[in-house]
Amino acid sequence: MVGARCTRCWLLAVMLACAAGCSTEPRQYVVKGKITFDGQPLSDGDILFASPAGDRGPDASRIKAGAYELKTTEGSKRVEISASKIRPGGARGAGGEPVPEEFIPERYNTQSELTAQVQPSNANLIDFELRSQK
């Protein structure tokens, strides 16, 4: 009786271990780095890593004090970086309030030319140096 109980416990443990290891989600890796804009750390913004094939949703993170950190799958990625700020004399909302405007050029976000190669390790340090002029 005791032997059968131990066998059942052992089988249950093996099944749980297999289920945990047989996830259908692809493995993700930590990617982090620094982002500058015209030589200065980008104080606040967003960064997005997307698969060029579009086979899964993008992975995103906030940029704070010129740094970011996120998890994404290995392989080639299209990278988009965006940030906005209130511009004096800029756009106004329906109530007259100032509306933040994107100041990062389109070549870094909606028409991004940025790419990254994520490796299967935790040493993915990828920095981006952005410029307002080409």
Image (cartoon, rainbow, N blue to C red):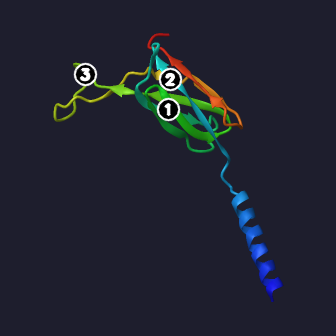
- Please identify, in this view, whether the residue under mark 3 or under mark 2 is nearer the observer: 2
Q: Nearer the viewer, mark 1 or mark 2?
A: 2
Q: Secondary structure at mark 3?
A: loop
Q: Residue at x 55, y 40 (%)?
A: 58
Mark 2 residue type: Ile
Please give the label number shown on residue 90: 3
Q: Which mark is residue 47?
A: 1
Asked where in the image residue 132 lies, by quadrant, the reply is top left
Circles 3 and 1: CB atoms closer than 8 Å: no
Label annotation for residue 74: none
Q: Residue at x 51, y 29 (%)?
A: 80
**Does label 1 or label 2 sit earlier along the sequence?**
2
Question: In this orientation, does residue 63 appear?
Answer: yes
Q: What residue did someone put label 2 on?
A: 35
Label 3 vs 2, first from the N-terminus: 2
Where residue 52 sits: x, y (%)?
A: 62, 34
Disc 3 residue type (three-letter)? Gly
Between residues 23 and 41, which one lies in front from this camera angle?
41
Q: Are marks 1 and 2 in contact (CB under 8 Å)?
A: yes
Amino acid type at image mark 1: Ile
Label 1, secondary structure: give it. strand
Front of the two marks 3 and 1: 1
